[in-house]
Image (cartoon, rainbow, N blue to C red):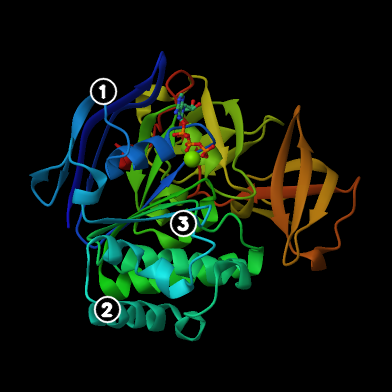
Amino acid sequence: MDVSINNLTKKFGNVTAVNNFSLEIKSGEFVAFLGPSGCGKTTTLLTVAGIYKPNSGSIVFGGKDVTFAQPKDRNIGMVFQSYALYPHMSVYENIVFSMKLKKASEEDKKKAAQEVADLLGIGHLLERKPGELSGGQQQRVALGRALVKKPQLLLFDEPLSNLDARLRISMRTEIKRIQKELGITCIYVTHDQIEAMTMADKVAVLKDGLLQTFQPPIELHTHPCTEFIGSFVGNPPMNLFNSKVVEKDGDIFTILPDKSMMKVNKIVDPKVYNKELRVGIRPEDIEIVDKGTADSSTGIVSLFEPLGRDNLVNVRCGNKTIQLLSSPKAGIEIGDTINFKAVDTQWQFFDLESGKSLLWHTK
Ligand SMILES: Nc1ncnc2c1ncn2[C@@H]1O[C@H](COP(=O)(O)OP(=O)(O)OP(=O)(O)O)[C@@H](O)[C@H]1O
Ligand SMILES: [Mg+2]
């Protein structure tokens, strides 16, 4: 089922939680809402669910305007961070609760419960009470309860936050597998960028109730259309500093904090040459090079953090600290003077005022 969210605004008193938000979600698409705490993710989701009524705007499911329809009439399934299972009921009773309200026959309930329980691998737990289950199993029951209604839209609000790191990774894969298997359109709220990047077909980034962008995860990383997205997505975060882009002998360069110049292999609007702007480069796109390499910069290692496969190295360059990743085998020590160079295709440039990307491909 397609979902259109059109100019949605939701206010609480004088707080505008969702501000003129529009999005087109295609049938069967997995969309993540990503953004910092308080940016309006839950409010948008609950408005789509019909739990909140918007102040203005509309919501259309499969061509039908549902803006003011009751949640129960929207054919949606919801899964939240708190599993909200009924503790005195068995897993089976929890799963078929909505069917019971609709007075489904015992036979239909049994068949439907068995189907979702098998899909979720909890078929052997149907007689247990929620208190006798692990967190991951409880979350599967909550998912089963949502799926048993055969919803056309699944809404998730941080469903994995209460699980430990390892279980989160396996549930991530599980949810994605089930969603693809059933082909259900899905909106998944998270503030965890890894979750959004690994699960979603497209990511909607929100900030202060405003939609910042709606892009596939990989583009979000390589072609951020604003400085906020560049800095919010990616770990370790993008290096950002004020500088300029200059042209020399037909090539484009940017100036590093130590006044050295590095080549830029990107199409930048010529109108911004020689003007102060915000320069971004990701730590993984900077490499340590031999002394004397052309277009490289020099800095002194001030700190490093072992991340496992790589070391995150802080390099003091001019009056700024630049972060880069290096192999632990490189044997770098604090106080070392090193030369480094960025991959020339990975530079980002943003307008100082608006924060918008100045690269032509993102327009
Ligand atoms: N019921 C409410 N009454 C008043 N203000 C609210 C209400 N619900 C949310 N808000 C406000 O609306 C804004 C958006 O809140 P929302 O819960 O949608 O954020 P969120 O992105 O889901 O954050 P989090 O990641 O912390 O869950 C916040 O400023 C919040 O304080
Ligand atoms: Mg929330």
Residue 138 is situated, as x and y percent measured from the top left of the image, at: 54, 67
State the residue position of label 3. 197
Q: Is residue 60 left or right of residue 263?
A: left
Q: Is residue 20 left or right of residue 210?
A: left
Dividing the picture into quadrants, the one containing residue 309 is: bottom right
Sequence-earlier tag: 2 or 3: 2
Give the residue displayed 49% in from the left and 55% down from the top.
84
Of badges 1 and 3, the one in the foreground is 1
Per the rendering, the mark at residue 55 is 1
Q: Is residue 269 visible?
A: yes
Sequence-earlier tag: 1 or 2: 1
Dividing the picture into quadrants, the one containing residue 302 is: top right
Give whichever of 106, 37 is nearer the camera.
106
Per the rendering, the mark at residue 106 is 2
Quarter of the C terminus within the rendering: top left
Q: Mark 1 near ligand 1 (CB under 8 Å)?
A: no
Of badges 1 and 2, the one in the foreground is 2
- Residue density around tag 1, few if under 14, some if 14–19, many if 20 or more, within 10 Å: few
Give the residue displayed 27% in from the left and 78% down from the top.
106
Label 1 and label 2: CA atoms lie apart by 42 Å
Q: Is residue 2 above or below residue 142?
A: above
Helix, strand or loop at label 3? It is helix
Q: Which amino acid does label 3 sit on?
A: Met
Residue 107 is situated, as x and y percent measured from the top left of the image, at: 25, 82
- Residue density around tag 2, few if under 14, some if 14–19, many if 20 or more, within 10 Å: few
Q: Going by the picture, which residue comes out furthest to the bottom?
A: 124
Q: Which amino acid does label 1 sit on?
A: Asn
Sequence-earlier tag: 1 or 3: 1
Label 1 and label 3: CA atoms lie apart by 31 Å
Give the residue displayed 61% in from the left and 67% down from the top.
131
What is the total number of numbered labels drawn onto the structure image?
A: 3
